[in-house]
Image: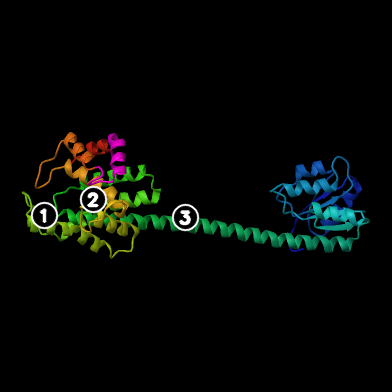
Amino acid sequence: MECKRKILVVDDEPHNIVLLEGILTKLGHDVVGAENAVVALEKLDRTFDLVLSDVKMPVMNGFEFVSRIRENVETQDIPVIMVTTLSQKDDRLKAVEVGANDFITKPIDIVELKIRTESMLRQKGQQDEINSFQFDLHEMVESRTMELREALARLDDAHVETIHHLCAAAEYKDEETACHLVRMAEYSRILAENIYLDRKSVQLIHTSAPMHDIGKIGIPDSILLKPGKLDDEEWKAMQRHAEIGGSILSMGSSDYINMGAVIALSHHEKWDGSGYPSGLAGEDIPLPGRICAVADVFDALTSKRPYKEPFSIEKSLEIMKEGRGAHFDPQLIDIFFDNLDDILEIKNKRSD
C-alpha cells in the first residue's frame, strides 16, 4: 500500500484479533482491536478507513453493529467487511441490508484478505477525495457567494449615492431642502410598510421617493422661484416637471431609477382624476405615486415655500383630511393618520 491506513478489527475471540492484526500490520496498516461491538463503537470515529467485524458476538452482534455505524453521521461512510462463517443466503442478504460492503469467510485466506481490504481501502480513498472536493467546492461557493453579495451591496450603495447626487442637483433649482427629501422618503416608507408591501418594494419606494421632483431641473427659475401665485401659463409650465422627471428617469436600467420614473410621473395624479399629467383616477394611479402624493403634500403644507409660509400642523392635517377620496387614496390617508405619531416624530427630528 502507498500509505498507512487505519483499520478497526472487532472479534470476541482474542486470537482472531491477533491474527488479523499481524497480517494487516505486515501489509502496512495501523490496526486497532476491539473485543466486542460496544467497545468498538466507543473507539470508532471518522479517522478510521475500514472496519473488519465478526458477525456472531455477545452483547451486540455484527448486524446491529453495522446498523449503528451507518446511523452515525461521523462513521456512516466507513466501509465494513464482515468476517464470518455464515454461508446462508439470507444471512448474507441481511448483512448487505444493514450496510456491510463485503465478506471474508473463515478460516481467513491471506491473499483474499489482502485483495478485499485493498479494494475497500481504494474505494474509501476515492470517497475521501470526493468528499474533500465537495467540501472545497462548498467553501469556494460560500466564499464567492459572500464576495458577490458584498459586490452587489457596494453596487446598491453606488446606486443610492447616485440618486442622492441626482436629487441634490435638482435642489440647486429649487428651495426645497435635503431635509424635505429625507422626510418625504421616510413618510413614504411608513405608508408602504403599513399597506403591507413586501420589504423589497418598501426599500425601492423609500430610496426612490426623493426623485419625485427631479423634473424641476427643467423648469425656468423665474417660475420655480416665483414668490407669488403662478398665472395659467406658468402653472402649465410648472406641471411639466412631472413629465420631464419621468422622461429623465425612464432612460435608466436600475430598479431604483425605474421606480423613480413611476413616482415622478404619477405623484401629482389625484384619486378623483383631477390631477396631472395624465388625469389618472383611483387605482389606475400606480401605488408608489399614490403613496408619495400623501407624503409630498403633507411635507409641502408644513414647510416654507417661495410662494407661502408653512401651515400649522393643525391646519395641514385638516387639509389632508379634506383630501381623502378626492386628492388622496382613502386607504392611504387612513394609514397616514393611524401612524401620525411616527410621522410627526420624523418631522420634528428632520426639521430644516
Quadrant placement of the N terminus: bottom right
Q: Say whether residue 30 is magenta.
A: no
Crowding around mark 1 (Cα neighbors within 10 Å: few <14, some 14 to 19, many 20+) is: many
- Label placed on residue 146: 3
What residue do we see at 74% from left, 62% from top?
123
- N-term mark: 1 or 3: 3
Element class at badge 3: helix
What residue do we see at 73% from left, 59% from top?
124
Whether tag 1 and tag 3 are in contact, CB under 8 A, the answer is no
Separation of residues labelled 1 and 3 (CA atoms): 47 Å
Element class at badge 1: helix
Question: Chief secondary structure of the magenta span?
Answer: helix
Residue 134: x %, y % from top left = 61, 59
- N-term mark: 3 or 2: 3
Residue 318: x %, y % from top left = 19, 37
Residue 96: x %, y % from top left = 82, 55
Dot 2 amino acid type:
Lys
Separation of residues labelled 3 and 2 (CA atoms): 45 Å
Q: Write the start and end of the magenta stretch as one range.
A: 324-342
Dot 3 amino acid type:
Met
Q: Nearer the viewer, mark 3 or mark 2?
A: 2
Crowding around mark 3 (Cα neighbors within 10 Å: few <14, some 14 to 19, many 20+) is: few
Taking 93 as reference, is 147 left or right?
left
- N-term mark: 2 or 1: 1
Dot 1 amino acid type:
Leu
Badge 1 is on which residue?
A: 224
Residue 240: x %, y % from top left = 17, 59
Badge 2 is on which residue?
A: 270
